[in-house]
């Protein structure tokens, strides 16, 4: 369980820590991106599910799903209560190198590191662990209503925007069930986060970060 739990716990723990001091989220984002990235690299041989192959058609569907989740994420904005607020405006930083460094690590972390550890945690580990605590005996993409419902719900509650988070969890889960491939979920999640990052930079709607 450790290779699946540790990167997730490190990221959450460092995110919480960042809220306790000035510029904490900006200082700790590069730190947690590097630390969590290293932990994923350290356990890389454990993640055999990331070695699954896929076709060009499946890749295209994965990208399309990522775009769909982005649209789902932004459309209902302001139409439902959220679980608190978030904001990551790098332009409050005093130096240009800090601003551009912060943007770089935010895009890098959100587009690569976050999709990797979240998909490994939610759709490789937890969705199978709910079915059987000896989760390695359960095939990737095995469906039960309980595991489907709980992972979709908890994935949503992990985010301030819980409603669209639940919808995103449902959509990513359906992609998993369709192709039984964690890599495609990682790609789709990465596409969502990358496009969202570009959208934030263009519009200045920092609350999405």
Image (spheres, helix red, strand yellow):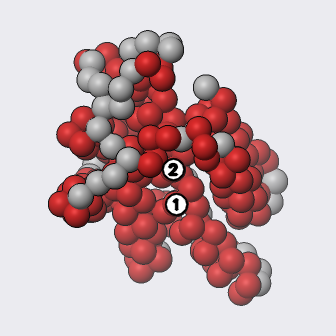
Q: Quadrant of residue 144?
A: top left
| Residue 136 image label | none
- Give how far across and how far down residue 133 sits, in percent: 50, 13
Q: Vertically, is 17 above or below 111?
A: above
**Nearest the eye: 138 or 105:** 138
Q: Quadrant of residue 87?
A: bottom right
Residue plotted at (60% across, 43% down):
45
Q: Quadrant of the N terminus?
A: top right
Q: Residues within 10 Å of mark 1 (few under 14, many from 20)?
A: many
* Numbered disc 2: secondary structure: helix
- Check if mark 1's residue and mark 2's residue have beta carbons within 8 Å: yes
- Give how far across and how far down residue 84 sits, in percent: 52, 43
Residue plotted at (20% across, 40% down):
178
* Numbered disc 1: secondary structure: helix
Residue plotted at (39% across, 15% down):
131
The residue labelled by disc 1 is 112
The residue labelled by disc 2 is 116
**Nearest the eye: 59 or 91:** 59
Left/right of residue 55 with respect to residue 162 in the rendered view: left
């Amino acid at each position: 369980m450790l290779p699946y739990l540790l990167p997730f716990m490190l990221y959450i723990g460092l995110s919480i820590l960042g809220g306790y001091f000035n510029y904490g989220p900006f200082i700790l984002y590069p730190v947690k991106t590097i630390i969590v990235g290293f932990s994923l690299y350290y356990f890389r041989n454990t993640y055999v599910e990331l070695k699954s192959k896929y076709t060009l058609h499946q890749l295209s569907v994965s990208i399309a799903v990522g775009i769909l989740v982005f649209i789902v994420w932004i459309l209902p904005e302001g139409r439902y209560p959220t679980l608190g607020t978030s904001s990551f405006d790098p332009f409050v930083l005093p130096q240009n190198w800090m601003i551009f460094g912060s943007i770089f690590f935010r895009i890098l972390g959100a587009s690569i590191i976050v999709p990797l550890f979240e998909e490994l945690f939610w759709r490789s580990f937890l969705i199978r662990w709910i079915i059987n605590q000896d989760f390695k005996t359960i095939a990737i993409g095995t469906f039960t209503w309980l595991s489907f419902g709980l992972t979709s719900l908890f994935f949503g509650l992990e985010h301030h925007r819980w409603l669209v988070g639940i919808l995103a969890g449902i959509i990513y889960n359906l992609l998993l069930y369709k192709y039984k491939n964690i890599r495609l979920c990682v790609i789709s999640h990465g596409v969502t986060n990358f496009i969202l990052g570009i959208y934030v930079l263009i519009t200045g709607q920092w609350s999405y970060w």
